[in-house]
Image (cartoon, rainbow, N blue to C red):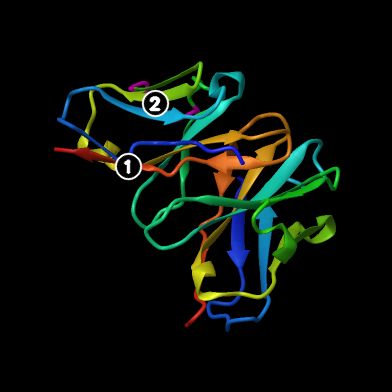
């Protein structure tokens, strides 16, 4: 079955740029999207179709997807960005896969 | 305003069948290419996709759980129902329903989730 691999954790200093990766076989041939999840909350879509930001999501969030890796980049990271981040893609036209999640710590 | 709300039992005994309902508003389940999925998250763990159903009535299930799942919809009631048989303590999780559109690749709206506990 298809798998998406994320680093368990990423640390970043306030104001710096955080990059969270998501790896999967030929992931660049699929659409990748990203969700932010804060404790006790439902996931929130922050990036879709590789690099599109939903309405209301800060311009500090950007995305890319090529080869086997999709990347979510957060520039000028703020304390409010501290959360778990999950990548997601469709394995085929019928099944969905989530990455294992990355805990972003702003320290 | 699009909303999704999950409902169902808080506690399910081992071997019993879980039935969850997702009630939606602000859109119709009969809208072209509209889809709804069930996704779960065990405490402290990652999201896991379970199943989805589209307005065309096309259905798909997680390969590892396929034998235990059934998804259906009642468009007139704006509801999608998931049943999971033979519940086990490892099925303890928050269960979410989420909306997608065929071909879009993403979930734009999520319910608040409902925590289901299966005691050991």
What is the tally of numbered marks visible in this picture? 2
Mark 1 surroundings: few (<14), some (14-19) or many (≥20) residues within 10 A: few
Label for residue A72? 2
Please state if B35 lies on the left or on the right of A82 as rendered: right
Residue occupying image coordinates x 52% and y 78%: B118
Decide which of B9, B112 is in the foreground and name it: B9
Query: Which residue was labeled with disc 1?
Result: A8
Residue at image x 63%, y 32%? B105
Q: Earlier in the sequence, mark 1 or mark 2?
A: 1
Place of residue A4 in the rendered image (x, y in percent of width and height, measured from the top left): 49, 36
Q: Which residues are magenta?
A: A54-60
Q: Main secondary structure of the magenta part?
A: loop
How packed mark 2 is, by other alpha carbons closer than 10 Å (few <14, some 14-19, many 20 or more), is: many
Verify whether residue A56 appears in magenta: yes
Label 1 residue SS: loop
The x and y percentages for residue A13 are 15, 30
């Amino acid at each position: 079955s298809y798998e998406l691999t994320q680093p368990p954790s990423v640390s970043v200093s306030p104001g710096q740029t955080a990059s969270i990766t998501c790896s999967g076989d030929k992931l660049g041939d699929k659409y990748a999207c990203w969700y932010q999840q804060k404790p006790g909350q439902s996931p929130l879509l922050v990036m879709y179709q590789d690099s599109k930001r939903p309405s209301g999501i800060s311009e500090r969030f950007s995305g890319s997807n090529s080869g086997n890796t999709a990347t979510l980049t957060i520039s000028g990271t703020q304390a409010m960005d501290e959360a778990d981040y999950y990548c997601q893609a469709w394995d085929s036209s019928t099944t969905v896969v989530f990455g294992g999640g990355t805990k972003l710590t702003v320290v | 305003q699009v909303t999704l709300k999950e409902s169902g039992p808080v506690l399910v005994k081992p071997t019993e069948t879980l039935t969850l309902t997702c009630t939606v508003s602000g859109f119709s389940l009969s809208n072209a290419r509209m889809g709804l999925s069930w996704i779960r998250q065990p405490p402290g763990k990652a999201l896991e996709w379970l199943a989805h159903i589209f307005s065309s009535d096309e259905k798909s299930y997680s390969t590892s759980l396929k034998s235990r799942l059934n998804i259906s919809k009642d468009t007139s009631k704006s509801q999608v129902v998931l049943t999971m048989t033979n519940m086990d303590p490892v099925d303890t999780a928050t269960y979410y329903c989420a909306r997608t559109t065929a071909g879009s690749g993403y979930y734009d709206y999520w319910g608040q989730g409902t925590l289901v506990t299966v005691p050991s």
